[in-house]
Image (cartoon, helix red, strand yellow):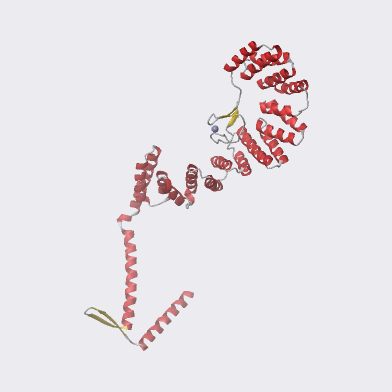
Amino acid sequence: MIRLSLYICIGLIIALGAAWIAAHPGQILLQWQAWEIRLSLATFIALFILYTLGFFAVLRLLGAARHLNPLNSAARQEKRRLKGEQELASGWSALSIGDQNKAQKMVRRAKAHLGEQPSVLMLSSQAAEGEDKRKLLDQLNQHDDSRVFALRGLLDLARQKEDWPIALAYANELNDLVPGNKQVLKELLDLKVKSGQWTEATETLKAARKAKAFEMADADRLAAVLDYTRALEQDVAGHHQAGLDLAQSALKQDPSFMPAAHLAARIAIRLKDMNKARKIIEHSWKITPHPDIAELFLKLEPMENATERFRRVQKLTTLYADHPLSAHFLADVAIQAGHWPEARNALQSLINAKKASRKTYTLLAQLEEAQKQDSAAASKWRAKADNAKAEPTWTCYACQHTSPTYHQNCPNCGTFDGLRWG
Ligand SMILES: [Zn+2]
């Protein structure tokens, strides 16, 4: 009905137009050099309409001819597609053995057969470098099918440039795209740590734990180091109680993470909560005795005399009696208190157990001097100390750098939590 009305309207307009032209006759003159053509307006309009209809008719004929063209048949298109896919496969094979030139040649051929579709752009981006690579990856990032590939590549480029904020932004996008992916979660966590986003990193670690991206013990250790780092920041900012809570949370995640025990006990002593500090120290000594913890233990009772100190240390060291540090700590305070037999027994037991180190022989030398003023015997022990096993220290597993104190980032290579005691 609407269409009929439209046709009637068009017919009316044409009829009115024709009547108007008949009522206003005129001529059109075309002149070119010696040529002159005179046409009535009605003839000109009729010719113009005929020309337009003819033009569209030719276009339709050309369109039909293209379908009939044997060069564009379905069979030929299929052949081109297969050829293009073979070229893509050859390109990827060339890349796998580092032959960039052949890969680029295959890209050019595949592009001629398949056009600029994502599969061609993917190979092209892998064969390209620098800014060209980035542009191709940006192009791929526009296609839903290739976004993961593009973001992975863009993330790698940002990593190469050590542009951590950009790398983090790509990792976040990638994580939104493929939530729960283990590799992406690990990478996101690493970048948040690199950017110092400790709270956000803790959240990502929770997601990574859920996705089983880490072994349980490794995840516990990481959680502990993250809490410890936040605890340090709080303590430095003057928020001692918050620092203490976070340090204790770190210890809950990993009771063997001694730096957290040291920090928690240190803050507790500063807050005059000696009971709490003592409990933290004793708990830590049971798992990982450490000279810094021993030092803090002495600070719990600054006014005690040498014998009182010896008795207290004796009690502490029974919590992990087999450990060389327990023997060293006990022998040290025993020498200061003049408890010679206890000092000698502790050190001799280490020698018997073949656990003696430089410290063991140095303490024996001190014992000889303090007990008997025997410098000849002391010199003998000191000579032995020179050739004995060194004391444990913080060593980076990534670069072997050693440090007397723990740092979350290795001072030499920057590896997060790279330092291990041993
Ligand atoms: Zn290192």
Q: Is residue 282 visible?
A: no
Where 132 sits versus 270, above or below? below
Q: Is residue 192 left or right of residue 18?
A: right
Q: How many marks?
A: 0
Quarter of the C terminus within the rendering? top right
Where 326 sits versus 130, above or below? above
Q: Quadrant of residue 92?
A: top left
Residue sitting at 35 percent across and 52 percent down? 77
Residue sitting at 72 percent across and 22 percent down? 317
Residue sitting at 68 percent across and 14 percent down? 369
Where 414 sits versus 325, above or below? below
Q: Residue furthest left?
A: 34
Question: x and y percent of residue 168 in the render?
Answer: 54, 45
Question: x and y percent of residue 196 in the render?
Answer: 59, 42
Q: Is residue 285 visible?
A: yes
| Ligand 1's quadrant | top right
Q: Quadrant of residue 88?
A: top left
Q: Is residue 138 left or right of residue 278?
A: left
Question: x and y percent of residue 384 in the render?
Answer: 60, 14
Q: Quadrant of residue 375?
A: top right
Where 211 sits versus 33, above or below? above
Give 159 or 47, whichever is nearer the viewer: 159
Give 311 or 350, whichever is nearer the viewer: 311
Question: x and y percent of residue 204 in the render?
Answer: 60, 42
